[in-house]
Amino acid sequence: MSRTVRPAAPADHATVVAFNAALALETEGKRLDPATLAAGVAAALADPAKGYYTVAEDAGQVVGQCLVTLEWSDWRNGWFWWIQSVYVLPTARRTGVFRDLYRHLEADAAARPEVIGIRLYVERDNARAQATYASLGLVEEPYALMARYPLPGRESAIG
């Protein structure tokens, strides 16, 4: 099987939306608002400053995705790439799809001197994902995640 990793294109919109909806339901038991999700994916596909999706294809079918967003580090004078919205079709899991996505992004980041590191979120209870990430050289950082979402007076886009 020949796998291709490439930047997502506007034609991938429906697939990325479907993958994100499946991801939220599977990992967090959350149903995302379809209109908000579709608009959010469209915004990222149209504006790389918001982030960009990378997809993996097997035989022309998209089987996995991830979103890269940027964080500027003033302390380190460089960019961290955050990997988010990782999803692999259930039938393609444990076949190296995420490894291929990650290695592609890692090589791209390493070729850019302004990129100083790669980070990602992982659910605390997702031991399988944590093991996969560790096998690729990612290590747990000493930070806890805290947030305020939604902001007061705004409704959550997640049900």
Image: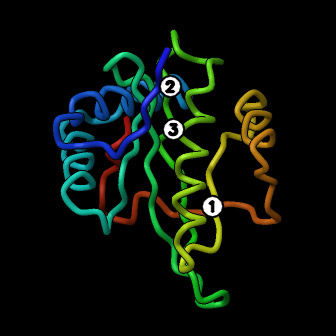
Q: Nearer the viewer, residue 63 or 120?
A: 63
The front one of 70 and 26 is 70
- Which disc number belongs to residue 86? 3
Q: Residue at x 57, y 70 (%)?
A: 80
Q: Is residue 73 left or right of residue 36?
A: right
Using the rendered view, name the quadrant where residue 139 is placed: bottom right
For marks 1 and 2, the one nearer the N-term is: 2
- How many numbered discs? 3
Q: Between tags 3 and 1, which lies in front?
A: 1
Categorize mark 1 by other alpha carbons within 10 Å: few (<14), some (14-19), many (20+): some
* Contact flag, marks 2 and 3 (Cβ < 8 Å): yes
Horizontal side of 141 relative to 116 (left or right) equals: right
* Sequence order check, earlier mark of 3 and 1: 3
Q: Position of residue 31 (x, y in %)?
A: 38, 28
Crowding around mark 2 (Cα neighbors within 10 Å: few <14, some 14 to 19, many 20+) is: many
What label sits on residue 55 in the rendered view? none
Which residue is identified by label 1? Answer: 118
Q: CA distance from mark 3 to mark 1?
A: 14 Å
Within the image, what quadrant is residue 79 found in?
A: bottom right
Instruction: Please tell me whether mark 2 sits on a helix, a strand or a loop.
Output: strand
Q: Position of residue 11 (x, y in %)?
A: 17, 35
Residue for badge 2 = 88
Q: Nearer the viewer, residue 22 or 118?
A: 118
How far separated are the C-alphas under marks 1 and 2?
Answer: 19 Å
